Amino acid sequence: MLQFKQNERGRLVIDLSKSRVVLGINYVTHNIWVNLKGRDPSGIVEPEQYETVKSRVIDILYSIRDPETGECPVSLAIRKEHAKDLGHWGDRMGDVLYFFKEGYSNKFTNTITGIDPKDLPEDGFELVLEGPEFGRHHSFLPNTTYCGCSIKGSFIMSGPGVRKGYKKPFPIGAVDVTPTVCYLSSIPYPSQCEGMIPGDVLEPASGEGTK
């Protein structure tokens, strides 16, 4: 599925002419793209094989095992069309996304500038001791804890028209930030804006008529 070659510096890079999938780098490593003909410049996968390759990628992810515990480190692997409810959508995301269980994480590697072969553990796993000061977020489901800490994002807002000392009982959506800021700033919403204004975070006079 994935083939590497050595570049002029002896580092490993993805061989696009032979790879059926392409991995993301660093913080987008939980995305996997099918190297699709007609869409990708170096695509080798025929369109009629697109779904088959995605299924194979998911099967491979679920087949990974921790050599010490036998546990699969992947909590969820899904096609991109099934990921919208998790906050993932758009043309820039991978064809397959996967998320780790607590206690596991991806190793930050750059498959474009190249990987030092010495950095690759023989069995695919490397024991790393981390604390909450390191932080992780992209490669986990929203309800995961990492080193005992939540990975959920924080939304803090203050200023004219905003309720003081109010703690919202349920999360605000990322798509709601733009319309809320526009409303409070009395500027037009962008034409592509999809969110709503959470009226409960506004002072009654400012929030009247909002939902």
Image: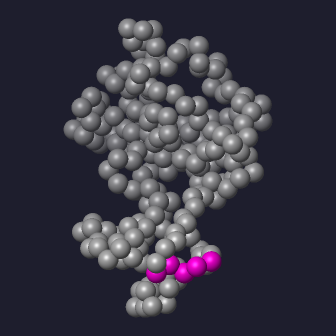
What residue do we see at 44% from left, 39% from top?
A: 32
Q: Left or right: where does residue 3 sit relative to residue 187?
A: right
Give the answer, above or below, for where 12 lies relative to 144.
above
Viewer-proximal residue, 83 or 139? 139
x, y percent for residue 1: 44, 29
The residue lying at 50 percent from left, 39 percent from top is 27
How many tags in the picture?
0
Relative vertical location of residue 141 with respect to residue 164 in this rendering, above or below: above
Residue 187 image point, x, y percent? 29, 73
In the image, 75: left or right of 183?
right
Q: Quadrant of residue 184?
A: bottom left
- Please identify the residue farthest to the front as the structure is shown: 160
Q: Residue at x 54, y 65 (%)?
A: 155
Kindly indicate the quadrant of the structure image that contains residue 38: top left
Question: Residue 136 at x, y = what percent?
Answer: 61, 45
In the rendered view, would you say 156 is above or below 113? below
> Which residue occupies the extreme left position in the image?
38
Q: Say left or right for 107 vs 32.
A: right
The secondary structure making up most of the magenta span is: loop
Q: Nearer the viewer, residue 208 or 148?
A: 208
Q: Is residue 68 magenta?
A: no
Answer yes or no: is residue 198 visible. no
Q: Position of residue 112 (x, y in %)?
A: 40, 25
Q: Nearer the viewer, residue 114 or 61?
A: 114
Q: Is residue 211 above or below residue 42?
A: below
Task: Kindly identify the residue that appears in the image at 49 percent across and 34 percent down.
Answer: 26
Q: Is residue 47 visible?
A: yes
Name the quadrant of the C terminus. bottom left
Colour scheme employed for the rendering of this structure:
one colour
The quadrant holding residue 171 is bottom right
Stretch in magenta: 161-165
